Amino acid sequence: MTCRMISGNRLMSGIVRLTYRMGITVSALLLMMIAVLLGGGDAVAASDEAGWKCSLLGGCGGVYFYAGKGTLSIEVEKVDLNDGPQKTYLRAILFGPDRRVLDEAWIDDDGLSSGSGPGKAGRVSLSTKVDSPGVYGMNITVTDDRYGEHMSWRFRTNCTHYLVETSRGHKDSRHEEPIVLRSPGREADVCFLPCAESFAIDVNGLTAVVKECGVYDASGSVLAVIPVTSDGTAHYEFPVDNGHGGEPWRLHLPDARAEIRIGGVTVWERSAAVENLSLWTPDISSWFNFHDNRWLLTPYSRTVYGEPASRGSVDFTLHNNSSRTRKIALSLEFESGGEFPAALSVSQLY
């Protein structure tokens, strides 16, 4: 394996070569490398069966799970709004760090007529055995509703660390990913990584019971109290502060019906450091540092075939998505305790 270390758009020094004999499948390295950088992963914890991780959401997208060894379990719920003729069949796909599909399920349309209002919730479960800590993902797509405007969904999981990415299909307009909450009657938090530049928070569609929204840092200190106008909107602008980007912040809403836009999270300036990466979580304790480690090793998997006793090499690229210089540790990991003749030329890159 020949590895190139890239920081942003800059190529950093460092070459790693994986040499092998016979046919091999290289797919476990991303599991191992994410575990090294993030600290090995947490053990998968028991879920709270009585509660969902978030309010009902609009939009499609999915969730990233930083899973430790054990069984990763996820339950997805969909509620059709029945506000139009669309038949909304939801597809949930669970994939591994190597992007291999591990499980998938469909939630059917509820069959109710247009204009009848929200129907009965449909639910499906997905699961997989996690042998090596790493970042797993779940994609959510919906037929005839690529923007997620005609149904709502939510999830619960036994994984303690996860991030939601609420994304939509292509539009011929500026790329925006507003966070849509559709569970009035319960409180909600939206936890996000603030950008270093000045940015604004805009919240629309709040219910009349909400008089103000609060913004807190990771320690719980109050950063801003945002008053809500009579038409259910709130707006606040944060100045430039290079200290923004270290830890997640928490936007608290007393009632979970809202459409939220956050600069650098749901809308971006072109070429921003985290452009088009709409990551957030309803629980600040679930946060993990996925921003710096996205695209860490590509391709995510590679299969090589060869004649017996033949030799060769495989090219991979290491990408440092962080703004700082980092040391990346490298090692080989083999499935089911087996080994094959393969070697790396170096054990770390800077």
Image: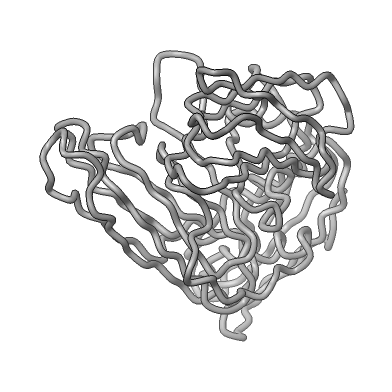
- The spot of residue 350 in percent (x, y) is 87, 48
For the residue pair 39 and 148, the one nearer the viewer reads as: 148
Q: Residue furthest bottom?
A: 337
Measured along the vertical axis of the image, is residue 244 above or below residue 230? below
Task: Quadrant for the N terminus, please.
Answer: bottom right
Q: Is residue 30 above or below residue 350?
A: below
Q: Where residue 314 sits in the image (x, y, percent)?
A: 62, 55
Residue in the foreground of this view, choosing between 300 and 56? 56
Horizontally, residue 192 falls left or right of residue 349, namely left
Q: Nearer the viewer, residue 79 or 11?
A: 79
Residue sitting at x 64%, y 60%: 161
Q: Please name whichever residue, 52 or 160, is drawn nearer the observer in this view of the structure.
A: 52
Q: Please state the total of marks drawn on the protein image.
A: 0
Q: Where is residue 197 shown, x and y percent of the image?
A: 79, 21
Residue extending farthest top = 173
Q: Please name the colour scheme applied to the rendered image.
A: one colour
Q: Quadrant of residue 248?
A: top right
Q: Is residue 134 placed above or below 115 in the rendered structure?
A: below
As displayed, is residue 306 above or below residue 250? below
Instruction: Judge left or right: residue 308 versus residue 105.
Output: right
